[in-house]
Image (tube, grey):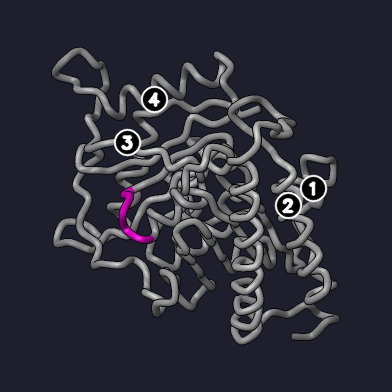
Amino acid sequence: MSANTQTLKPVDLRSILTFTVKLARTAGTLILEGSQAIQSTSDVNEKKNSVDLVTEYDVAVEELVKSEITKAYPSFKFIGEESYSSGTRNELTDEPTFCVDPIDGTTNFVHGFPFVCISLGLIYQKRPVLGVIYNPFLDHLYTGIEGQGSFLTRGNGQPLKLPLTNPKPLPSLQKALLAVEWGSDRGKKTLVPKSDSFLRLAGDPADGIAGGRMAHSIRSLGSAALNISMVAQGGLDLFWEIGCWAWDVCAGIVIAQEAGGAVVGSHAALAAATSAGSSIDPFKVTPEVLTGRKYLIIRAIPDTSNETGREAQLRIARDLYQTVEDSEPK
């Protein structure tokens, strides 16, 4: 890789992936140590509201990650949840940029619920190109490089290509296992449209729920990165969220896309891309989609005699957005 032109080739990305995986595992050890410490004390430093706990370990993990990245790749830019919260604002450029959530699933982390991960994404030329998501509690490692596939490694096992099984058709939302999140903003303006949307997704239209889609079921893992990883794996059919940030989804986007998944931005973005005469790719992750805080990720769907997998993903996206309400996150 040339330090002057900052050109990243596939071989460079593989080298960066090796570094990033090692870093994720090192950070994972610190996350586990922090969890053990938190479970043995009642003095948790709460810097946000009661459903979005930020602890000293969140900061410590980000500092570790940023320090190691700076030593290995001093010219790379850095966007992190904790540095952003403290006032640092790094705009997206064409330069390689690590986009990091040190502990995704902080509330799970505090409560000892083992769906917690570090999410390490790399943005290049304003698009996600590499992702590493590591859950140290389950020792599950998800990795992906643009154009080179995505994988799950469990423990010391061999990497398993994603999705783990051949994708099945998805005829409707009624057959879908969905992931959503309540989020940290519990104000009426946010919570009412979100809960109404959940009601319609789950509800039975034949038993009083107007517009109900009666989805197979709904899950919340408490981590956007792990929800997306599970979509890539094939365990979830889709994940919809308003309010999370680029560092929550950057790594997962690469992993999901490389597993055949589709990523959609907001209601408005989908409507613009699918309007008559539009040449916009509805599944292209533009900088506006990456930073837009509105995301829909749909698993791989195979071609059938009636429609291509891409057409099926677009159909599901339209159905979902006709069911749920749009809102503006804080």
Q: Position of residue 199 (x, y in %)?
A: 33, 22
Q: Is residue 206 above or below residue 310?
A: above
Residue ID at (55%, 55%): 285
Magenta residue span: 233-237
Q: Amino acid at mark 1?
A: Ser
Question: Would you say the residues marked 1 and 2 are in contact, meaning their CB atoms lie under 8 Å apart?
Answer: yes
Label number found at residue 197: 4
Closer to the camera: disc 4 or disc 2? Answer: 2
Query: Distance between the Cα atoms at labels 3 and 1?
Result: 33 Å
Among numbered discs 2 and 3, the one appearing first in the sequence: 2
Query: Distance between the Cα atoms at labels 3 and 4?
Result: 12 Å
Query: Distance between the Cα atoms at labels 4 and 2?
Result: 30 Å
Can you identify the residue that label 2 sits on? Answer: 80
Among numbered discs 4 and 1, the one appearing first in the sequence: 1
The answer to whether one can see residue 100 in this image is yes
Q: Is residue 230 magenta?
A: no
Q: Is residue 239 above or below residue 155?
A: above
Q: Position of residue 309 (x, y in %)?
A: 28, 60
Query: Distance between the Cα atoms at labels 2 and 3?
Result: 29 Å
Among numbered discs 3 and 4, the one appearing first in the sequence: 4
Can you identify the residue that label 3 sits on? Answer: 218
